[in-house]
């Protein structure tokens, strides 16, 4: 094979595949090369020069982090000269570095501290005139230039992985600093990834600053509970105050390979504190015994969803969860055409892809991890990204290569057009070919506003690509033609080399959809609610009839967008009653909730693995060992594609149910660090159409309800669609996310 | 290491000798004779004379506790003290948390936060003296010589908590102003001539 390169490191035979660097090959073969600025998920920063190696026959040192090996070279990673070089670099790093390890947040987990000790730098031999460097307060992030070692990891991550591109290096030799890019102060989505990658204490969380030390915190590996990405994270807990209970102090992630958005990093204190209230418990048991239905949200583990399903089977109650029900319906329709239970793509597939279509989701706020994955693909593979949505998104601007704006409600038409374009040269069956031939392209293009030239442009830009991904978001699930859209998506997946990613709305929408047999939500009385609206409310939010634990207080599993079953662990204890206690009282007996983990339905792809046997870590080379991936299940292919219906029109003031950055649901709303902007955001055009102005208090009437908001004019938005946050009042998943509304100014 | 001196159990050869002690009387007459001898030899007055002599000389060695107290060694490890900086009178503790970490009986707890001057401030600090074993690790590990042991050994109080308040441990400001704060000389304290051993940072400019 010509793609494998054989060479030697320290007289040991090693191999590297094409595109790998000497450093990557060395790490894979357990050969240690020290680094300071290297981070696996970005391109090499090449700023520290500590990873220098010697290559026989080549004069001088070679940077192993950005040099690919050639056949037969002999690399030396340790010689006296290299040792001297590296020690000198460390000595230079330590020049005037403030000796404030005693109070520095990074102390104990600081790369500079570790490397200084590793190279035994005990005195300062070089000197430079110190500068006055002022600390910067950038909101959630705090920057201390005096501690900064200019490794540039933060800049690389912000640009290559996150896509905010919000910080840059202000070059000036010894006085170089990190500054916000083209702005006075930091204006970004505050993912905090720069904090995570900072090897020293230069970039720190403002909230965490000086509150605890690395060695005092106990780590609880778990899964983020805010969106369907299900990111790996570690809650770090400690006693609060001299006599206090444990509380979560911060969240960390494996930044070397994974990322985390700001909601996961800063929105961790959504726990619910309660004591055992026997009276409320008895009432809850009685309520469930006599109830007609249980309404619940998808912020629930598979195990608890399984308990609810058992309650349904035993007591004959109905289960309401519109979010999961519509998702399940979409997926089963998809399966009826594709013949598979689960969609084929994953976030990793996006990272590898070079052609991506995103449709039916404002992905930057719906699922930031997919945004990061798309950004990574665009930066590392030069991926062409088509972003199809009625609303332009500023955050996608530097990532998307083509914005395909379609009219609200015309998703079915757009999908048909995409299918027609992508299946043009595919060998499809007769029925599909007839369907495609019968499409009234002129009508679809006119109504959806997606022109022929746009589709041609897309095909042209995808010409050289060989790894395609289609991302479908949660706008579609409650669309009146969701079923046909699912079939169209399945067709594209079936007949092209596109893999398909369907993005559920909540953390465990996919899991609930697989575990429970859900009923259509009717507006009936006597409903017990679990984290939802009802007559008897069990909730981990405030004002509940029975307090329940939040997702950082329970053990269990969730299914994320990658169809991966991920374990959640208990970061904080909960003293009250849990759903399993209620089930026990009702005769469904198991000692612990997690005893149900291995009983989850095999027919849906779950494996019979006990919770305690699930791993939750990444191996040093980045391979994901968290939980397991659902087994692929084959289904009957009995679905047939239907004709496209007339495309609906949405005129006037349309409101899109969409949260601002870093907000997802009532749980993120509970956290103290995340910004809570509940205003309706719209463009100047929207303001003119609705006859309102910036700062007005307005009343928005939808078909189902009326709410009050403050209107905020956002100059980054265009068109007559405004964004209405749902994180404070909860989202009605049974309704299409775009809604016609009546807006009145409240005087 | 040679083990002979330990293995040789023949004590007589190593300078030990038996004291010449008269045999105890075994019969009644012998016992009677001993009582008479002890009663009339006036041994009692030998001791009484010593007491009388010392009383007249007024050379009294008894410490009149609690009016008088013996000085205790500088390394004595009694109830903790929190020191202040000589230069500014502010507290030395920087809240690094090392004492909390090293404490083997897990009796130190502290809480820190960022203060209005962007410095790390200790907002809560307690030592549970009910658990403390006075091992001195906290004083040894402290990088700022802030926590030390004091000489206060009188721990009688209605409640142990009376000793562990941060304010109580901190050198009173009037004592500080009077310059009477004592440095701890136990483990962790700097040794004499430390200044001469400090390596200086090169200042080329």
Image: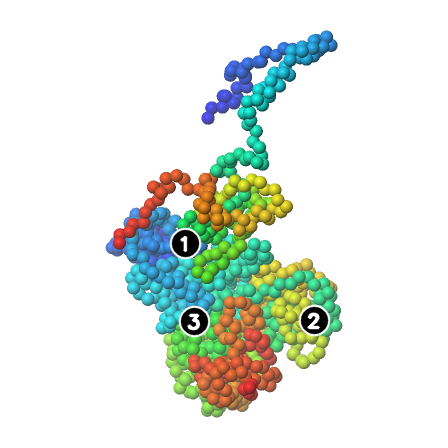
Mark 1 and mark 3 on one chain? yes
For marks 1 and 2 on the same chain, the one whose residue lies earlier in the sequence: 1
For marks 1 and 3 on the same chain, the one whose residue lies earlier in the sequence: 1
- Relative to A453, say whether A111 is above or below: above
| Element on which disc 2 rests | helix
- Relative to A691, say whether A204 is above or below: above
Q: Residue at x 58, y 40 (%)?
A: B154
Mark 2 and mark 3 on one chain? yes
Chain identifier of the residue bearing label 1 in the image: A
| Element on which disc 3 rests | loop
Q: CA distance from mark 1 to mark 3?
A: 29 Å
Question: Residue B52 at what x, y percent from top left?
Answer: 60, 20
> Which residue is disc 3 drawn over?
A188
* Residue A314 seen in render: no
> Which residue is disc 2 drawn over?
A312
> Which residue is disc 1 drawn over?
A100
């Amino acid at each position: 094979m010509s793609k494998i390169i054989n060479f030697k490191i320290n007289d040991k035979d090693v191999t590297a595949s094409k595109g790998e660097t000497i450093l990557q090959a060395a790490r894979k073969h357990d050969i240690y090369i020290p680094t300071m600025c290297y981070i696996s998920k970005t391109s090499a920063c090449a700023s520290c020069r500590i990873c220098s190696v010697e290559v026989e026959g080549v004069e001088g040192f070679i940077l192993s982090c950005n040099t690919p090996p050639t056949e037969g070279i002999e690399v030396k990673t340790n010689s006296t000269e290299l040792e001297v070089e590296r020690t000198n670099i460390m000595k230079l790093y330590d020049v005037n570095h403030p000796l404030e390890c005693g109070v520095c947040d990074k102390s104990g987990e600081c790369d500079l501290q570790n490397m200084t000790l590793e190279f035994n730098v005990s005195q300062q031999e070089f000197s430079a005139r110190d500068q006055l460097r002022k600390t910067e307060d950038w909101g959630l992030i705090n920057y201390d230039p005096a501690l900064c070692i200019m490794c540039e990891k933060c800049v690389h991550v912000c640009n290559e992985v996150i896509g905010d591109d919000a910080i840059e290096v202000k070059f000036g030799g010894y006085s170089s600093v990190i500054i916000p890019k083209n702005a006075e102060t930091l204006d970004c989505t505050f993912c905090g990834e720069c904090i995570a990658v900072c090897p020293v204490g230069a970039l720190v969380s403002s909230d965490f600053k000086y509150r605890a030390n690395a060695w005092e915190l106990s780590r609880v590996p778990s899964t983020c509970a805010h969106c369907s990405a299900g990111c790996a994270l570690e809650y770090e807990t400690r006693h609060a105050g001299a006599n206090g209970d444990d509380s979560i102090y911060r969240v960390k992630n494996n930044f070397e390979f994974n990322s985390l958005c700001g909601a996961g990093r800063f929105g961790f204190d959504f726990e619910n504190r309660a004591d055992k209230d026997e009276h409320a418990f008895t009432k809850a048991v009685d309520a469930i015994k006599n109830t007609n239905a249980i309404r619940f949200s998808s912020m629930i583990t598979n195990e608890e969803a399984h308990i609810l399903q058992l309650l349904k089977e035993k007591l004959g109650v109905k289960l309401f969860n519109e979010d999961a029900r519509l998702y399940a319906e979409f997926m089963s329709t998809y399966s009826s055409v594709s013949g598979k239970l689960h969609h084929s793509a994953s976030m990793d597939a996006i990272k590898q892809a070079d052609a991506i279509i995103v449709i039916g989701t404002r992905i930057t706020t719906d699922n930031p991890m997919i945004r990061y994955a798309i950004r990574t693909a665009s930066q590392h593979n030069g991926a062409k990204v088509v972003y199809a949505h009625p609303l332009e998104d500023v955050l996608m601007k530097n990532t998307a290569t083509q914005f395909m704006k379609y009219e609200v409600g015309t998703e079915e038409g757009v999908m048909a057009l995409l299918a027609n374009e992508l299946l043009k040269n595919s060998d499809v069956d007769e029925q599909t070919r007839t369907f495609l031939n019968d499409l009234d392209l002129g009508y679809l293009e006119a109504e959806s506003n997606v022109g022929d030239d746009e589709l041609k442009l897309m095909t042209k830009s995808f010409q050289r690509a060989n790894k395609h991904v289609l991302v479908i978001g949660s706008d579609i699930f409650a669309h009146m033609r969701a079923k046909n859209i699912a079939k169209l998506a399945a067709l594209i997946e079936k007949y092209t080399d596109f893999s398909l990613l369907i993005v559920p709305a909540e953390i465990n929408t996919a899991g609930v959809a697989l575990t429970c047999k859900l009923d259509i939500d009717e507006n009936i009385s006597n409903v017990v609610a679990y984290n939802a609206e009802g007559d008897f409310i069990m909730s981990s939010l405030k004002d509940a009839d029975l307090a329940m634990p939040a997702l950082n207080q329970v053990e269990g599993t969730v299914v994320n967008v990658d169809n991966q079953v991920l374990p959640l662990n208990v970061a904080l204890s909960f003293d009250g009653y849990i759903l399993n206690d209620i089930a026990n009282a009702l005769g469904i007996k198991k000692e612990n909730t997690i005893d149900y983990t291995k009983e989850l339905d095999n027919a849906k792809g779950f494996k019979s693995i006990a919770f305690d046997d699930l791993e939750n870590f990444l191996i040093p080379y980045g391979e994901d060992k968290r939980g397991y991936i659902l087994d692929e299940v084959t289904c009957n292919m009995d679905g047939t594609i239907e004709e496209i219906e007339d495309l609906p029109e949405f005129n006037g003031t349309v409101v899109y149910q969409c949260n601002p950055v870093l907000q997802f649901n009532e749980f993120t709303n509970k956290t103290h660090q995340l910004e809570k902007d509940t205003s309706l955001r719209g463009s100047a055009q929207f303001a003119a159409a609705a006859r309102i102005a910036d700062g007005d208090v307005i009343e928005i009437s939808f078909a189902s309800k009326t709410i009050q908001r403050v209107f905020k004019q956002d100059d980054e938005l265009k068109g007559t669609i405004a964004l209405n946050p749902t994180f404070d009042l909860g989202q009605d998943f049974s309704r299409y996310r775009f809604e016609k509304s009546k807006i009145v100014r409240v005087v | 290491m040679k083990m002979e001196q330990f293995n040789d159990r023949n004590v007589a050869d190593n300078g030990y000798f038996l004291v010449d002690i008269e045999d105890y009387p075994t019969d009644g007459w012998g016992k009677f004779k001993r009582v008479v001898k002890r009663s009339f030899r006036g041994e009692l007055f030998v001791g009484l004379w010593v007491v009388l002599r010392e009383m007249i000389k007024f050379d009294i060695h008894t410490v009149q506790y609690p009016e008088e107290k013996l000085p205790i060694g500088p390394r004595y490890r009694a109830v903790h003290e929190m020191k202040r900086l000589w230069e500014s009178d502010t507290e030395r503790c920087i809240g690094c948390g090392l004492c909390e970490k090293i404490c083997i009986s897990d009796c130190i707890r502290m809480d820190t936060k960022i203060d209005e001057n962007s410095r790390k401030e200790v907002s809560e600090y307690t030592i549970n003296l009910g658990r403390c074993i006075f091992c001195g690790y906290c004083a040894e590990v402290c990088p700022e010589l802030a926590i030390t042991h004091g000489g206060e050994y009188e721990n009688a109080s209605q409640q142990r908590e009376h000793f562990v308040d941060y304010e109580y441990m901190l050198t009173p400001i009037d004592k500080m102003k009077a310059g009477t704060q004592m440095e701890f000389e136990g483990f962790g304290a700097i040794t004499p001539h430390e200044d001469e051993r400090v390596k200086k940072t090169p200042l080329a400019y």
